[in-house]
Amino acid sequence: MNNHLLLTHIRGALIRLEETIIFSLLERAQFKRNRAAYDSGALGDMFGAESLVEYMLHETEKIHAGMRRYTSPDEHPFFSDLPEPLLQPLRYHENPLVKNTVNLNHELLRAYTDILIPALCAEGDDAQYGSTAVCDVACLQALSKRIHYGKFVAESKYQAEPERYTTLIAAGDRHGLADAITDDAVEEALFQRVAKKAGSYSGMFLDPQSAKNFQTTVTAIYRDIIIPLTKRVEVDYLLTGKR
């Protein structure tokens, strides 16, 4: 097995991403919900049919695409009309993933706007639209990387038990695959670890009650958004990857 597929290696990468996600959410939480940043046309027609956040994300991805970010197997764009890399593409000889097109960023963006932001941020408008959009881009990119890392988790589990997974894949058994990839003990340990980190980090910047609320919200984000979408990525990857 490729060393990058060892679950210990993968879990280490996911644990490191927790800090990135928690701090990016903490940065976003300092501003109010700012609905105008998410509604097309709310700030005028300067962004075309896109909202401010969509415009900022789209323009950021164009720049990053030129720097070949989305040629990496662990990066997934939110937009498909991106320019070709300006730099010569790298060859990822150690990429263990089978060819696939699984990308749940459209669902992530919807969940982020409709569920995550209302839960994370105080209702209201502080007019900090630019700062809001900058924070949102950082949050969305970190969340996307974390969720789509599920492909590596799925491939690792497949290679550890190929016969079991081949049978489930051949039957198109989404429920069976979901059960196979789920480890309740690992998930519970993750939620406890995230809660501890969120409480500790927010406690350095927020009053005790606000820090407690942030801790509860971040744990719920992992439980209700990040992990379910990650599992969707894993199952979709196993079902669509051509072996």
Image (cartoon, rainbow, N blue to C red):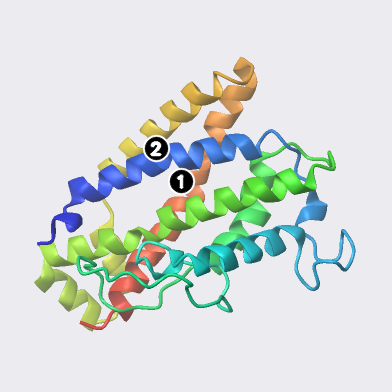
Direction from residue 28 to residue 92 in the image, left or right: left
Question: Upstream in the sequence, badge 1 or badge 2?
Answer: 2
Please, what is the three-letter code of the amino acid marked with disc 1? Answer: Arg
Question: Does residue 30 lie above or below 4 as drawn?
Answer: above
Residue 189 x, y percent position in the rendering: 31, 36
Q: Residues within 10 Å of mark 2 (few under 14, many from 20)?
A: some
| Depth order, front residue of 141/203 | 141
The residue shown at (72%, 43%) is 131
The residue shown at (33%, 80%) is 240
The residue shown at (50%, 37%) is 22
Considering the numbered disc 2 on the image, is that residue within a helix, a strand or a loop? helix
The quadrant holding residue 176 is bottom left
Q: Are marks 1 and 2 in contact (CB under 8 Å)?
A: yes
Question: Does residue 5 lie above or below 243 as drawn?
Answer: above
Considering the numbered disc 1 on the image, is that residue within a helix, a strand or a loop? helix
The quadrant holding residue 228 is bottom left
Residue 52 x, y percent position in the rendering: 76, 59
Q: CA distance from mark 1 to mark 2?
A: 7 Å
Please, what is the three-letter code of the amino acid marked with disc 2? Answer: Phe
Residue 196 x, y percent position in the rendering: 42, 26
Residue 242 x, y percent position in the rendering: 25, 83
**Residue picked out by circle 2:** 191
